[in-house]
Image (cartoon, rainbow, N blue to C red):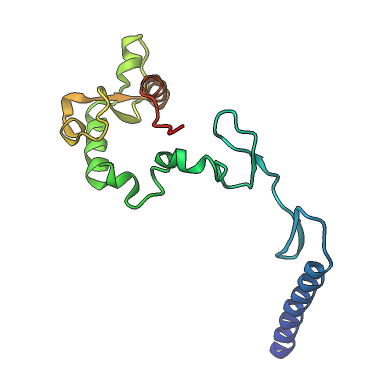
Amino acid sequence: MRRSACALRDNVKLTKVKMREALQGSGYPQGFFVGGDGIMPSRPKHPCAHPGCPELIPYGEKYCEKHAPLHASEKKDTRAGGSAARGYGYRWQKASKAFLHAHPLCAECERHGKYTRAEVVDHIVPHRGNMKLFWNRDNWQPLCKQCHDKKTAREDRNFPREYKY
């Protein structure tokens, strides 16, 4: 019984391999790839995310080859160290959790008479890499995710990214 199950499994593998080889050699239409159990459509290309660039790029990439070097600073968490290298490591996680435990309500919502649970410890004045300002607890405030996202978007709008045109 076991022998026939192994033979069946090996036969299925051989069939998939033969099918894959036959289809790849047959010039199957572009935009499809052979994988898994058969022929799969590939995801469509999308425009480069650089403002005004119409170049179509493969799924999983954000910028075309021409504009990728201009946006290298956007790959914050993919570089070595990621968020921990910017100060948001284990020490920050412990400190922010304790701060949220002591200050459970969103400061911005409270100013408007609403009571919303705080989820994020925000730096009132953006630290921009200044570790003294980063760890200054007088510069921290508890915010809900919605208020934090609004505040961050407002601040980032006034702090231009480094584009090298």
Front in this rendered view, residue 105 or 57: 57
Coordinates of residue 42 in the picture (x, y in percent): 71, 52
Coordinates of residue 46 in the picture (x, y in percent): 65, 40
Residue depicted at x 39% and y 21%: 147
Residue depicted at x 40% and y 27%: 145
Front in this rendered view, residue 111 or 29: 29
**Tag count in the figure?**
0
- The quadrant where residue 19 appears: bottom right
Residue at the top extreme of this rendering: 112
- The quadrant where residue 9 appears: bottom right
Coordinates of residue 106 in the picture (x, y in percent): 32, 21
Coordinates of residue 146 in the picture (x, y in percent): 43, 23
Residue at the front extreme of this rendering: 165
In the shown orientation, is residue 107 left or right of residue 73?
A: left
Front in this rendered view, residue 83 or 91: 83
Residue depicted at x 18% and y 34%: 135
Front in this rendered view, residue 88 or 55: 55
In the shown orientation, is residue 8 left or right of residue 150?
A: right
Q: In what quadrant of the picture does the N terminus appear?
A: bottom right
In the shown orientation, is residue 145 left or right of residue 7?
A: left
- The quadrant where residue 127 appears: top left
Residue depicted at x 78% and y 55%: 30
